Image: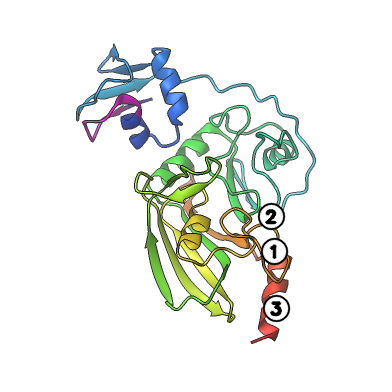
C-alpha cells in the first residue's frame, strides 16, 4: 500500500490512520515497530512527524488463514452475486467472533454459504466483513467475497459514498420534524466498554426525520454521514431520546419488554464494487418491530 500525506504535523501512526481508516491504530503501531512502514523509502519511528508530500509505503501482511468453522445458520439473503452478498441480519446475531462469542456468528453462517470464498482482508475472524452492525441492531450488512470487492467497498465507506438509512423507535416525543446531530464520539472515560460524546472524539454526524409520533415514543428515519461505533444510539441518548430497549445507553426499561435496541438498518445505497452499477436495497422491519408499532397505533 502506498499513498502521499495530505496533512502534515501529525505523528506517523495518527497521520496514516487519518488517511487509511480501515487499518486499526494497534495494527499500525505493530507494523511501524516491525519496520514494515517506510517514509520516503526510509524506516522511521512512530514519533516521526509527517510533512505534506511525504510518501508512505506499508508492507502488506498476508491475510491470516481462516480457521473458523462454517456453520449452517439460516440467512435472509437480500442480494448475492459472485462478488458480494447482502444479508438482512436478525437482532441477536453477532457479526464476527470475539470475546464471549467464539462461534454461531454471521461470519460462520456466511462461510458455510460461500464455501470459504470470502475476502481475506479482514483477517481470520472477520473474513469478508466490510462494515458492522451491533449484535442487537437488525438489518442490511454487506459481505465481500473477494479482496477486489472488499477494497472497492472500503473506498466507498471511506469517501462516505455508501448511504445507510435506519429506522429507530426512540423514547419521548421529539418536537422537531427533522434535525442534524453533530457531536464528536469517542471512547467513554468512565466506562471503556461504552462510547460517549466527547470533545476528543471523532466527527460524528447523524440526520433524523420524524416518521410518526406516538405520545411517549417517536418513530424516526435516521441517516448517518459517519460510521462511529454505536453512533445513532449515543447521539439519540445524548439528546434525551434513547433508542427503545437499548440496555447500554438508557435504563432499557420499556412497556413492551424489548431487550436490545429497536434500531433497524433498513436501506443501503451503493455502487457495485466491480460493475459500478447503482444498487439500492431495502430490508423490511422485523416482525417484533411491526407488532410493537401496531400496539402503539391502538393507543393513538
Residue 244 visible to an observer of this rendering:
yes
How would you classify the magenta stretch by its main secondary structure? loop
**Residue of label 1:** 286
**Residue of label 3:** 294
Q: Position of residue 237 (x, y in %)?
A: 50, 61
Q: Which residues are magenta?
A: 3-13
Q: Are marks 2 and 3 in contact (CB under 8 Å)?
A: no
| Nearer to me, 73 or 294 | 294
Tag nearer the camera, 3 or 1:
3
Instruction: Point out the tag, 2 or 3, that comes first from the N-terminus.
Output: 2
Q: Residues within 10 Å of mark 1 (few under 14, many from 20)?
A: some
Depicted 218 relative to depicted 137: above or below: below
| Nearer to me, 100 or 78 | 100
In what element is the residue under mark 1? loop
Depicted 204 relative to depicted 292: above or below: above
In what element is the residue under mark 2? loop
Amino acid at each position: 500500500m502506498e499513498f502521499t500525506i495530505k496533512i502534515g504535523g501529525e505523528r506517523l501512526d495518527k497521520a496514516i490512520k487519518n488517511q487509511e481508516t480501515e487499518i486499526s491504530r494497534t495494527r499500525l503501531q505493530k507494523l511501524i515497530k516491525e519496520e514494515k512502514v517506510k517514509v520516503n523509502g526510509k524506516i522511521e519511528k512512530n514519533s516521526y512527524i509527517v510533512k505534506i508530500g511525504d510518501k508512505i509505503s506499508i508492507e502488506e501482511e498476508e491475510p491470516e488463514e481462516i480457521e473458523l468453522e462454517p456453520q449452517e445458520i439460516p440467512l435472509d439473503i437480500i442480494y448475492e452475486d459472485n462478488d458480494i452478498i447482502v444479508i438482512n441480519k436478525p437482532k441477536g446475531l453477532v457479526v464476527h467472533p470475539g470475546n464471549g462469542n467464539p462461534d454461531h456468528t454471521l461470519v460462520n453462517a456466511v462461510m458455510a454459504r460461500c464455501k470459504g470464498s470470502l475476502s481475506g482482508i479482514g483477517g481470520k475472524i472477520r473474513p469478508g466483513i466490510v462494515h458492522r452492525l451491533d449484535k442487537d441492531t437488525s438489518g442490511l450488512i454487506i459481505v465481500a467475497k473477494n479482496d477486489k470487492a472488499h477494497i472497492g467497498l472500503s473506498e466507498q465507506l471511506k469517501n462516505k459514498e455508501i448511504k445507510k438509512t435506519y429506522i429507530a423507535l426512540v423514547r419521548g416525543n421529539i418536537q422537531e420534524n427533522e434535525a442534524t446531530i453533530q457531536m464528536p464520539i469517542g471512547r467513554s472515560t468512565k466506562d471503556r466498554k461504552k462510547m460517549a460524546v466527547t470533545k476528543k472524539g471523532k466527527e460524528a454526524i447523524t440526520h433524523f426525520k420524524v416518521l410518526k409520533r406516538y405520545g411517549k415514543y417517536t418513530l424516526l428515519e435516521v441517516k448517518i454521514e459517519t460510521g462511529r461505533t454505536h453512533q445513532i444510539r449515543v447521539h439519540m441518548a445524548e439528546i434525551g431520546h434513547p433508542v427503545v430497549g437499548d440496555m447500554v445507553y438508557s435504563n432499557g426499561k420499556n412497556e413492551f419488554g424489548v431487550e436490545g435496541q429497536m434500531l433497524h438498518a433498513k436501506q443501503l445505497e451503493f455502487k457495485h464494487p466491480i460493475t459500478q452499477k447503482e444498487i439500492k436495497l431495502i430490508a423490511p422491519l422485523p416482525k417484533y418491530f411491526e407488532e410493537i408499532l401496531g400496539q402503539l397505533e391502538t393507543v393513538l
